[in-house]
Amino acid sequence: MKDVAARAGVSVKTVSNVINGAHVGAATRERVERAIADLGYRPNISARNLRRGRTGILALAVSEVDVPYFAELARLIVDTAEEHGYTILIDQTGGDPKREQYVVDGMGARLVDGIVFSPVAMDHLDIARRTDTTPLILLGERVSAGTADHVAIDNVAAARTATAHLAGQGRRRIAAIGTQPSYAQGTATMRESGYRAALNDAGLPVDESLIVAARQYHRRDGAEAAAYLTELENPPDAVFCFNDTLALGAMRTLHDRGYRIPEDVAVVGFDDIDDGRYNVPSLTTISPDKAGIARSALRLLLDRIAAVDSPPREVTVSHELRVRESSGAGPRRRP
Amino acid sequence: MKDVAARAGVSVKTVSNVINGAHVGAATRERVERAIADLGYRPNISARNLRRGRTGILALAVSEVDVPYFAELARLIVDTAEEHGYTILIDQTGGDPKREQYVVDGMGARLVDGIVFSPVAMDHLDIARRTDTTPLILLGERVSAGTADHVAIDNVAAARTATAHLAGQGRRRIAAIGTQPSYAQGTATMRESGYRAALNDAGLPVDESLIVAARQYHRRDGAEAAAYLTELENPPDAVFCFNDTLALGAMRTLHDRGYRIPEDVAVVGFDDIDDGRYNVPSLTTISPDKAGIARSALRLLLDRIAAVDSPPREVTVSHELRVRESSGAGPRRRP
DNA sequence: CTGAAAGCGCTTACAG
DNA sequence: CTGAAAGCGCTTACAG
């Protein structure tokens, strides 16, 4: 920078002004810009950050970035952040409580200006206890108000809609895959409530043997849960899976065991990932407004960075049921 | 840091030594650590970076992080980087030449210590022209030696194996989906050569009408290409797709149009993404050693950071053919 | 083994 | 509109 100033015959202040778009005489600006180009000068971000007290980096902390839902979300968040001049750094917690605590504690050092965090093991009590002040936005969990900013869809309503859809198709033994008994505050619990509520609404009994936990939400877990269900004395005629990968895994097993989908068993998922749209049969699912989630998360985070002490906010993003072949929409083959 | 030093009754030098694990007397260390805990002190990374001349951040630049192959790779790279004390920042180029140029130019500012880059539009000539000195590792393209470090599998051999497998099953009209005529130096070109070579090996004629370009490598592109193929007067009895998402999209269309897989058309993909394993039918594919790619890329990058002027290196990672149902392995249903 | 001080490369009041 | 100088919070020779 000093070299640029020397070459342009101005002070470093002027160089700084040119770089940061302050008012500088056209001729001077021209000289400085030429000097910058000649020298191949580029500002040192660390120095700027040190001075400004910010880094221009935000973290996205998820369990695993190759889970399709998170991959799609990451894409949107990276793009949205870029529009706001921020860069996204990825942190993978693997759902490990220690690593989640690290996120809640601001990720060790003042590396990021803020964090978008999708918790697995942490609940709102853990988060309420945090002392770190790094702006933090929670994703995908309905935390009781007052704890932290967060963005979610109405998981209870969405699960209720999904289950009601199956009941509306005349299904009577509707299973659920994906409960997580160890995380009482999580998204899974919300979806389970919605599921139970819808059975009630439809006057169907809740058969606890049809409610299957899943430790993770990978295809493998869905496949295993479906295997268990098919071995029941009285197997289900429909399955509501708490996410799409569970549903895709479950459908694979159901197919292997000779069940026709949707004729013998209807399947509904959650997330509307790209995989489900092209699967045979295509997957009925709850489609959250992912772009809306990304946008809201970034807006909340930038607002929080600007006003650290403002009261926590909660944004509920819309969702809709997308009915496809796996629950009986349309022909499965157009010859 | 000054506050910590004051509270512990030592100089900042000693605090720095404690933080960075230098030799400090046990009693002193103890006092400093307590002061750090009491004050909730955390080092300012920007200041450290400014001093050290590095940031501890590496960039992964890919077209879109929600493409399953990149999502899986991102996961591995984030994990591997973490083992080495580095954090990964995601840059999405969308395959846009301008954005790719920005990556090749070191991403604007001295924000990252190095870059792992999967180019789409840039070829090795573009990269040879670069003047920026940010350590850069290329992924997935076989660039002629001497340009830059890079990691790839042997795409020609892999494509040849995949195609030979189809020919070995008695397929005679083997189509290819995924050529990219505009990028003569890219991975697609390698896979096309391997495909052509295998047809030759098998004594099969090359029918240019069976070779279909794909602008992107999404399911949609595969679906469209397959639609074209089914409308040929003489449709193929096998399709080699240059990646798995193309194959999954193609299979959806083939199914919709009444083709049985693999009976009427066998399908082979490339990448071995998780989706293909659970699909019905499961997808035969080339499985690159993705963990090996992540490991090699990081190793090359860290070596390059340590020795900026060492000669460029090329690492070839292994791959293997995984035969599954889509090309005729085993029963499609176990009742 | 520890202290006092310089300096990394910026930004920004403070003068002019 | 521009210059000279302080200071952001670290690390690291240089002394002791």
Image (cartoon, coloured by chain):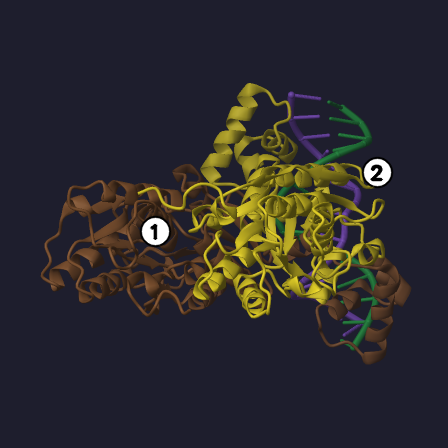
Chain colours: A yellow, B brown, C green, D purple
* Up-down relation of residue A11 to residue B175 (above or below): above
The amino acid marked with disc number 1 is Met
How many badges with numbers are in the image? 2
- Judging by the rendered image, the residue that carries numbered circle 2 is A310
Residue sitting nearer the eye, B70 or A82: B70
| Label 2: how many Cα within 10 Å (few below 14, some 14–19, many 20+) | few
Residue sitting nearer the eye, A18 or D16: A18
Task: Read off the chain for label 2.
Answer: A
Task: Read off the chain for label 1.
Answer: B
Secondary structure at numbered mark 2: loop
Q: Is residue A62 visible?
A: yes
Q: Quadrant of residue B51?
A: bottom right
Mark in front: 2 vs 1: 1
The amino acid marked with disc number 2 is Ser
Secondary structure at numbered mark 1: helix
Query: Residue D16, image x and y in percent?
Result: 80, 72
